[in-house]
Amino acid sequence: MPTPRKTRKFRYVSPFGPGMPAGLPVSAELLGGKGAGLARMSRIGLPVPPGFTITTEACTAFSATGRFPAGLEAEVKRAVARLGEAMGRRFGDPKDPLLVSVRSGARVSMPGMMDTVLNLGLNEETVAGLAAASGNERFAWDSYRRFVFMYSDVVLGLSEDECPFEAIFRKHKKRLGVELDTEVGAEDLKKVVAECLALVRKSTGKPFPTDPWEQLWGAIRAVFQSWDNDRAIAYRRMHGFPDDWGTAVNVQTMVFGNLGEDSGTGVAFTRNPATGEKEFYGEYLMNAQGEDVVAGIRTPHPIEDMKKEWPRLYRELEKVRRTLEDNFRDMQDLEFTIQQGRLYILQTRNGKRTGLAAVRIATDLVREKRLSKEEALLKIEPDGVTQLLSPVFQGKEKEKALKAGRLLARGLNAGPGAATGRVVFTAAAAEEWARRGEQVILARQETSPDDIRGMKAAEGILTQHGGMTSHAALVARQMGKVCVAGCGELEILPGRKRLRAGRRVLREGDWISLDGTTGEVLEGRIDTRPSDLLRVISGKAKPSRNGDDARFRQIMRWADSVRKLRVRANADQPDQARTAVALGAEGIGLCRTEHMFFGEKKLPAMQRMILAETPADRRRALRKILPLQRRDFEGLFKAMGSRPVTIRTLDPPLHEFLPHTEKDARALAKTLELPLKEVKARIEALHESNPMLGFRGCRLTWLVPEILEVQATAIFEAAANVRKKGVKVQPEIMIPLVGHHAELRSHEQVVRRIAEEVMKRKKIRFPYLVGTMIEVPRAALTADEIAGVAEFFSFGTNDLTQTTLAVSRDDAGAFLPSYVDRGVYERDPFATIDREGVGKLMRTAVEQARKTRPDIKLGICGEHGGDPSSIEFCHQLDLAYVSCSPYRIPVARLAAAQAALRD
Amino acid sequence: MPTPRKTRKFRYVSPFGPGMPAGLPVSAELLGGKGAGLARMSRIGLPVPPGFTITTEACTAFSATGRFPAGLEAEVKRAVARLGEAMGRRFGDPKDPLLVSVRSGARVSMPGMMDTVLNLGLNEETVAGLAAASGNERFAWDSYRRFVFMYSDVVLGLSEDECPFEAIFRKHKKRLGVELDTEVGAEDLKKVVAECLALVRKSTGKPFPTDPWEQLWGAIRAVFQSWDNDRAIAYRRMHGFPDDWGTAVNVQTMVFGNLGEDSGTGVAFTRNPATGEKEFYGEYLMNAQGEDVVAGIRTPHPIEDMKKEWPRLYRELEKVRRTLEDNFRDMQDLEFTIQQGRLYILQTRNGKRTGLAAVRIATDLVREKRLSKEEALLKIEPDGVTQLLSPVFQGKEKEKALKAGRLLARGLNAGPGAATGRVVFTAAAAEEWARRGEQVILARQETSPDDIRGMKAAEGILTQHGGMTSHAALVARQMGKVCVAGCGELEILPGRKRLRAGRRVLREGDWISLDGTTGEVLEGRIDTRPSDLLRVISGKAKPSRNGDDARFRQIMRWADSVRKLRVRANADQPDQARTAVALGAEGIGLCRTEHMFFGEKKLPAMQRMILAETPADRRRALRKILPLQRRDFEGLFKAMGSRPVTIRTLDPPLHEFLPHTEKDARALAKTLELPLKEVKARIEALHESNPMLGFRGCRLTWLVPEILEVQATAIFEAAANVRKKGVKVQPEIMIPLVGHHAELRSHEQVVRRIAEEVMKRKKIRFPYLVGTMIEVPRAALTADEIAGVAEFFSFGTNDLTQTTLAVSRDDAGAFLPSYVDRGVYERDPFATIDREGVGKLMRTAVEQARKTRPDIKLGICGEHGGDPSSIEFCHQLDLAYVSCSPYRIPVARLAAAQAALRD
């Protein structure tokens, strides 16, 4: 009597999909990320192509012994048989073969792991069966060709160098005088395959495996082995992932969207990813493979068309859409294939969206009671919020340009916002021009991951090919960049550095403007201005009808109700301060004071000070600056009201205030009535090998205390003056580049002396703080001593990163990007705090400082203060506040809330 | 019946000196450093002027309450009375008054504490008594004048600004047409005093105190108050000294060396401080004050003269000399005063000595069984040992110069050794010229503490005034500098930047040579060569007759027997390596490889490599360098035999290999047959804002691994070749500027691959290590991860100090000296490890590294590796070795021994 089926449990294999037995419990540990996703979709009844996952435990066993664990073979055989039953086909059946894909799938995606093998199960016999069953010989042979190419590469490990398959294919296309793969017919494909198979035999000394089972076991073995290849091991070492995680293997039935006019493929979002509106959004293409859509070779149709053209399929998709949102409780980005009228969902994931969409979707999902406000807050990518504040065209400038006939073309509105800049045609050029301070628009036929850095450097991205879900569109939205995609009316010629629109030609460096909200591309420069949202929030415009600003405020209110970190702005001008307050700043965390030494009247006085011989002469020169600086501070204090304002005393080296050219030196000598020789000698004397590590910050005010005196006098006099007008300003004086507590002590004494003098003279008393930047490793290491003097610390993580990593930010371009590319640093350490290095030093500083002064006020004012991951780290350190540029404040508020929620 | 005296115990007062009651137990805690020294001399029966010490406990009580503690007044009165009895005079006696000095004396000497007040007890009445008793009215009034000056300044706190006493005195001297104080007679001194006293009354509103008791209590109070002045408090904060230490007050009978021809003063060393020979050595001056000798106004007589002139006093002094050596068990430097035929010892301390003398004295004291070898080792200042290795004139050059009549003058042989250089006349000029790479001789009339840095920068020091114990002589000996002092035959004119010797005139920049061993000063350049000791030790000369080399070896043997740290050399040439081995190097700790890319054949290949476009082109260019570098390494390995050799791979940035001038760029373009534009563009592209933090070290070899490959190939091929000849070389490959373990991993893989290839090809196997410099703070912070890859660490404390302090060594001249001057850093952190900052990071690195790899080999190869205090710290960290320049190796051996002995 045969054992009843249900008692034969699986141990190493977890089936999924319609018609398959129940799988193992859903867990990424056991099934890998991809396997768990497939299992989950299967559970909620979505039509995923059936298949099975071989667990990570099987991999771990294989790694340890070099052999498949006992029982695995039987389980795989059984699962394949069940797959055949579910699909009504048999694996290796020469008449109508079951074909499968094999993919690796570790707990997290990891470079070095084996790539996908599609169409596994094909050989000389089954390909004929596939041709017969599909009624499409070309399809069958092209599938076989693809399988041979992939299998040889990823399983047999034959590189293009060893087996130039692509070259062979190209040779045939050339012979036939065609360009596209699809133009090669079945007979020629047979020739290509035959040549390639012969090459494999010659190269390996063995024939290409024809037995589908041999193919399958070869692929499974290759996945397991890829877990232990050098690249994967190096990656795990780098990220501290244990070796015994192992990888799963996903074996899944192949489905084809290119089996005729009742087949097709598509991608869709359950809501509009650009605006967040609750509408089904996507595109599809009949008789096509997924890669045809992504590559942008043919232009797909909007999903609405399907409603008319394929009403049943549309209804099915609509149901899938609802099911997904019910279960995943978020906007989903799904891929589907229709094989001869039957719908399959290949993948679903939380959809990328613009900041605008993220805010709308989050508030809508709360309104729909799908999410709590805390969950909703966690759904919004903080960086995306900046997009709401991204610029629009100024006034009626665009309208004028349109009237003037400057419209070049219309493309897809892939990334909203307005951008203007000089057009460049390569990512490298974009980076280079941007480095020179130019605004650029990157124009490409289509982008690829190689272009990422250039895209980041550009104001906007313009592509000739590709749809709303093309690489350019996806990445631009994620980055919050303006993007017009698939602009087929244009001809973009990177080789010739030209862009042609009808008879008009733009060359590299010509101005161009993009409206990413409408998809318009315009010739010439159209200046941009802050977003409407920003204007509404700043009180410069009325609330919008679409309610975007109300939703934004809603999110910010929720964020404020949960966050623990306070958020301040880096600002040094009254208008910046007002914007910051409008965006929610609770104070100024960094007021740089160097600009207060520049300007028509101030710079000559500063230069005279630098060229003075005695303290008395220096004081005399600085006295001219004092009333001007006092006015600067009064403006800032008024803008900030009773909020704290942290003012950093002079930081840059003196040579920044002196002329850099012979001509300017001559002019200065004349102005100051000094011999040119003397002026040049002083400039020469102030030259430094490594200015970053030179005579600046508190080192300067240590030897030239007159500067500190005039700054402190201006600050306290301004504070006294505005206090008398009822503005309860709280100045916090911050000394930069402190490395030793004695430096701070000496500065503190000067500041307190001046404060006493001013308060006595002005007959008013008010509180103020004296503290320091922590930006020198020695300061962090001796924070206990420094906290004996400092009432507050503010981490200057820009410089702290430069010194801790011994990397000059100005010079890092030559090597740092390669460190990020190769995964040494997960993210640019100047954008996101390097927690292992710089973070360790910060933690030491925090712990040491609190030992000496438990109530010390701790903050951060480096650019990291506006970076979500760094903000999370600051929350973990229990800092009091982060300080960032005004436009990053909403990001910081949200990121701080998320950190508190995750805590 | 009166209470017997002996039962009335002292509590706050501790008497000392002949005729005084027994004092409290000798302890610096209670009596301060100075008080304890006086008490100790008193105990061993030396004729110190009697006096008493008010304890630190009295000060602590005063600090707490602002009042003298109960009982103190009575004790002081009693002590003063006993003092009068001992001296046969009475305090305040108008006929023959007892005068005292009042000095502060904390546990350690501390800036901010009250200066000395001399001649306390004088007023209009007692000054007459003093005149009568001494029979010298001028002496009495000059003593009174000095007292008024000092007391007004240090007790009444009247600055020269408020009470311009010196100006008044100058005015009178001008009026009288005299220059020296001694030329002003009694009557005029009376006028000066009267004017000054009037000024005090006008300035303070109170008369100058005339009551001797009021004077005394005022001075005691001022000492106590000075403990709590800002400067002293700041100094204690800076050094972590507790406030409750308090200071003692020393009240001591005045003795005078200027009371006639049977009075005098002198200083002496119990052995020759220049050679260490066991001979009484010193100088004295009759009818003079101590300051006359130190200031070098009159030229004193050698102590031998006293034997003839004052045989009784000489015998007494000889006895003192023996007593001191018996008790202090070291060579002493003593000050004495003879007052009307009676000898007083004012002070004794361990004498400063040359390195030569230190070695001789230490070995002699062991031979005399006064010291154990361990104690002897601790008596030698390690830095002094370098002096034994200091240069002498080459061949017969000096003899030739003498014959040619180039002798300018003869002075005192104050600092042995030979020096040649360009003469400069200010310390600032010495620093500046030295910075430009010039050898300089600093010529001054007399030096002062302001000149210290200039003296350090100079090869030798020449003074016109001052004796063997003048400032110049003392400091030069301590620094191990060549010095000719008191060369009265010369006229040194700093204002005119000239030096006159009879009719010959030298101008700034002219060459001059000094023989510090003979005192000769010669015109022109006479090249120097290594010391005889060095030649003997290196086997280039026979052992010397005077036994100096034998003594040196003896000390080194003792040091080697106790030290735990191994000592290696920083060397990259075979001759350096041989010198290092002769001086005791146990390996090479740092072989810099950059010079191996310079030279006639190598540099063009390196430049071609830098300008190459592809890795293949780079390899082709580097291939030319390979055989030359292999030969370099073979030479080094042969010199080092079986000792370990740590080789650092290329460290400097590429721009160091490219031309810096238009002309050189043109030449390079021609050589390489490249367009000039391209060469210049490459130079431009390699320019950096902060090269110290730029594209160098492992960042370079990370992106241009071809350099690493050729270096590793050269090293392993060289090692294989010399191994085949029986030299058991142990190469250790060291990767510079690592900040992340992944960087090191990637380099390690290249090195190991090359090693395997070479060993396979050469058919020989040998051990080698791969490790890293720890010179980036991030590396220290993540040492646990880096130790997972590195087999050894070597602390590169030069760069680690630059990055930890954020101080560029090249630019630090503008500010760092002021940090050292103001005591922020006790010593230059580039000379001595900053233990609080850099040291903390090193400790973290050591602890973290040992967690991952308990047997990791740890060393240091920064310049700190030759600095005694830093070596002590390395011993405390339990490093395996220190590595320093070859000539510092004996210093390091001795310092390592001392660290072990102190442990």
Image (spheres, coloured by chain):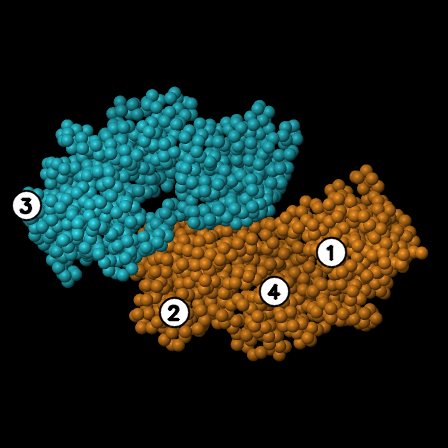
Chain colours: A cyan, B orange
- Please say whether residue A492 is visible from this viewpoint: no
Subunit ID for the residue under disc 2: B
User: Badges 4 and 2: C-beta atoms under 8 Å apart?
Assistant: no
The amino acid type found where label 2 is placed reads: Pro
Both marks 4 and 2 on one chain: yes
User: Which residue occupies 64% across, 67% down?
Assistant: B379
1 vs 2, front mark = 1
Between circles 4 and 2, the one closer to the viewer is 4
Compute the Cα span from label 4 to label 2: 36 Å
Identify residue for label 3: A132
* In the foreground, B313 or B370: B370
Q: Residue furthest front?
A: A1
**Do circles 4 and 1 both sit on a common chain?**
yes
The disc numbered 1 marks a residue on which chain?
A: B
Q: Could you tell me if the residues under marks 1 and 3 are in contact, i.e. CB atoms within 8 Å?
A: no
| 4 and 1 marks in contact (CB < 8 Å) | no
Q: Which residue is drawn at 83% across and 63% down?
A: B18
Q: Mark 1 points at which residue?
A: B30
Foreground tag (3 vs 2): 3
User: Which label is found at residue B902?
Assistant: 4
Q: What residue type is labelled 4?
A: Arg
- B576 versus A366 height, above or below: below
- Which residue has dot 2 on it? B767
Q: Which residue is drawn at 57% across and 36% down?
A: A769
Pointer 4 or 2: first along the chain: 2
Pinpoint residue A282: horizontal percent, then vertical percent.
Answer: 22, 33
